[in-house]
Structures are given as C-alpha cells and as structure tokens.
Image (cartoon, rainbow, N blue to C red):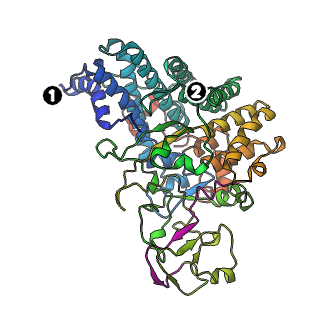
Amino acid sequence: MKTLKYSKLALAAALLMVATSSCKDLLDEKVVSQVGSDYITTAAGFEAGTKAVYSSLRDFYGRENGMDVTVFGTDTYTFGSDGSYKYMNQYTTQLDSRTQPIVDIWNALYVGINTANAVVDQAPNVTGLDEAVKKRRVAEVKFLRAHHYFVLVQLYGAVPLVLNQIKAATKEATRTPVKDVYAAIVSDLESALVDLTPTTPDYGRVTKGACEHLLARVYLTKATSEAAAPDDYAKAATYAQNVIKNYTYKLLPDYASVFQQGSGEINDEVIFATQYTADPTTNGVGNETHLYFVMEYDAQAGMKRDVSIGRPFRRFRPTVYMLDTVFARRYRVNDSRYAKSYRTVYYCNNPGTFTNLFDTSKPSVTLKLGDTAIYLPGYEMPLAQRAKKPYQVMTPSLYRPNLFPTLTKFLDPLRPDLQYQPGSRDFLMFRLAETYLIAAEALLKQGKTADALPFINAVRRRAAFPGKEAAMQITAGQLTMDFIMEERERELQGEMFRWFDLKRWGALISRVQKYNPDAAPNIKAGKHELRPIPQDQIDRTAGGITAFPQNPGY
C-alpha cells in the first residue's frame, strides 16, 4: 500500500513563506492567505514542506521533459513519427536555451531545492514534532536536494549552488564550479545517511539503502567528471555492495514482475521510486511514460485502440543498434529481457477483412476477434513464408517511425479509459539490478574483474529463460566496458539512464554518431555533452551573460 502521498498543493503551501516576502519586496502588495508564513514551523506545515520536496520528483521522473533529455539523442533510441521535440534527438540548432523541456527541468528542480532549503533552515524552529522524526525529515530532504543537484550538474555543468532558503527575490546568481557542486552533493548524502533508517512505515520515503545507492551512483559518475578523485570508483563499489549485502532487497526471480502495475511496483527489488496514485486530486498530470514508447498499432488491420495495449504517442523508437546488437537475435535464445520488454504479438480486437496492409506479401487478411493480427518475429522472415501467414508480419525492414517494437514496461492498463493520460504507476528510480551493475562497473574500473564478475552474472542469471541460466553467465574475459555498455541497456532500457551513461563514459558523441543516424550529422563534441543554460536564467541575472555565461556552443 502506498502511504506517502504528496501533491503540488503541499508545494504551494511550503513555498508561501518565500512568495510572501518576495512579493512584498517587489510589489509592496499585501498577501492574503489563510496560511501564514510561519506555517512551516508547525508540525503539519513541516510535514507538508517535506512532502512538497518529494513532489518535485514528479517534474522529472515519469514526464516527457525528463525522457527527452535522457532517452532522446542516444545510441539506443531515436524519434518516432509524432511529437514536438524531434530536434532534441537530432541536435539541430533548434536545441537551444529556449527549449522548453530544458527550461522546465531547470526551474522545477530549483523550486524543489529552495523548498528543501526552507525545510532544512526552519527545522530548528519547528514545534510539536518528535525530534527523531524531525531529524529523519531533514535527512530525507537533504537526500532529495542532493539528487536534484546531481541531475542539474550532469545536464548543465556548473550551476548555482544555493543551500539556504531564498526569502526575497534576487537577481544575483553565479555558476558554482562542478567540483564544489559534487562536494555539496556528497556532503548532503553522507550527512543524511546518519539519520535515515533502513525501513520506513511510510512507503515511498527515503531510506538508508536509497541513500547508499545514490552515493554509489554519484561516485561512479564523479569518477569521470572534472571533480574526479582517485578513490571515486572504490567508494562507488563500497556503497553499491553495502546496498546489496546489508539490506533486505532482492532481485525478483522474474524480470517482467519488476514492472507489474499495482502491488507489483512495491517489491523487494525497488529501492526508491517517484510516487504516483490513481487519486486524480493528488496525482497531477500523472506518470506519462505509458504514452511515449507505443507504436501506431491502432491504425492497422484488425486493431483499434485499447487501454491495455496503450495510447500510442510514438515518441521514442529503438534504433537498429538497439534491436540488432544490444538485443541481437543470438542473445534472445537465452535472454528473456527482449521478450519481456517488447510486444511481439498483437491480437485482433477489431474483426473484419482488410486490404490496406503494411505487409504486402498478401493482398488482404481476414481476422476474427482474438486472432493474431500482427506478429513481430524480430528477423527477416522470407517473403514466401510471410505470405502463408493469415496475419501481418512486421519484419525489421518494415519498421518505420510509426511502426516499431513497443517497449511495454511503462504501460498503464489501469487507466480508466482510452484517452486518459495521467498514469498511476510509480516510476522506479532505483532498483537493485542497477546496484549490481554499478558494483560490477566500479570494480572493473579498479581492475578487479574477478570481483566484478559475480555481480553482472547475478543480473544475467535472473534474466535467463528457465533452464538457460548457465548459458547466460559470462567469463572474466568477456567482461569489458563495451559489454557493460550493452548490458546496462538490456536491463535498464527506457529508464532514464542512457544519456547520462554515455556522457560519463565519454562516449556520447562517438556512439551517437555511429548508431543514431538521425542525430549523427549534427551532434558536436565540446557542445552537446551539456545542455544549454536556460535563457530566462541568464536574462534574470544581473549582468546577464557576462555574469552568468552560457555553455560552449549555444
């Protein structure tokens, strides 16, 4: 049962004290509200402020904005036939400081940070709340603040580091060096770790395990940044192994069960998730990821739109590299992750005889309810063989921007109707399989291949079809960084890691040029490893671009 509920209403309450003083300074207006600026120092207000910081996770996870900057423009996903931000995948000059997802993410994360700052700063003044609970809440928001800065520093590089509540509007801002931002992130997380607990009665709150997992990810990323230190990989490996050994998390026996909606989202593998709910009064726009990876099945012979199959926004389409190399046909014999991640069969829900076919191996198909309407074999089935099938066969040569394998892990069949957009499934931010992969990579980077091997093999054994576990294990000689680059995507495809991964490996430019033909002509080294600083941030800073310089190339 989900017990941690949060919404933008809580966020508004928490920020009221900031808005009050800002409005007074700028407009000399009297703010009229039933909630005073001292509300956050009450037990109820302090709890609302804490939940407001959690709420800011929804501005990144489960949203198109977050997907655009992490899935698009990589080696494994390109654009589908619809959507307004194809140029973010193509890296054209339209990708600039006014690009809405880039502006929205910056603003939303800083709102969350300032709310976190208010909670931390006002904690000593809070009355009526148990001191142990208060310390845990401060630790929770320090974790969330560190998380937000971690996203910001990866996307934008040097960013303003503000660790105290802003109570009045200001036009003063500077870009803090990356090294100092990472130092603040680590400080927040290590400080939070002391006061967090291994478990929590309110599912969805930050725990010790979540904090150690994020520390492992931060150190793994920091190791290749301009803030790198010699012991980063060692610390990443230690924190990852702590998560694996010292808590009750477990890899589920079945890969597909990790993403089962409803009670399945709360399972032994999930370490931390952004919370969504079926309650429309607190769900906001909801988890939108169910929309973006679905092909245009509903315009094909024998098919019409169905809640369980998805509403096809067809935003993100897997690249040839993703399908033919990462999920090469020879791997699919033993590895269940392709079969459990992509839809290969569509069953007729709109019976009749149809002649408008993408599979021209036959002039028509006649389909009854429940018949196979579309089959994706994943290889080039010969024309003569396709012609014998009483349904359409979609081979790789027939994939198009509107027709491609659909990633199913984010689908939301619990939506109340065909058009409903606010999904209710949680977005799984941290899960134990990623922790194993972090441990394997961090150990490999230290030259400890033998120590790394069991961690990656544990993930691969879980992914095996029954009876294929031994065939899925690799040897020390096979464990290379190239292997890890592909293994992470087999396990984590679509989960908002790939752009960050490619960047920290120093492989963004080379791999996008090699494997994403839609992006290859325009992506540039020295520019596209960072996102542009939002223009409105530069414009609202005293001194403009001189005081707050833009990233190179924009």
Q: Give the range drawn in magenta.
A: 335-357
Q: Main secondary structure of the magenta part?
A: loop
Pick the residue in front: 72 or 41: 41
Check if residue 274 falls in the magenta segment: no
Q: Which residue sits at x=42%, y=67%?
A: 305
Residue for badge 2:
212
Q: Which residue sits at x=46%, y=21%?
A: 139
* Picture mark count: 2
Pick the residue in front: 185 or 513: 185
Residue type marked 1 = Val
Residue mark closest to the camera, 2 vs 1: 2
Asked if the residues shown at circle 2 and circle 1 are in contact, with their CB atoms under 8 angstroms apart, the answer is: no
**Quarter of the rendering occupied by the N terminus:** top left
Q: Is mark 2 on a helix, strand or loop?
A: helix
Residue for badge 1:
32
Q: Can residue 17 be seen in this view?
A: yes
Q: Which residue sits at x=46%, y=51%?
A: 289
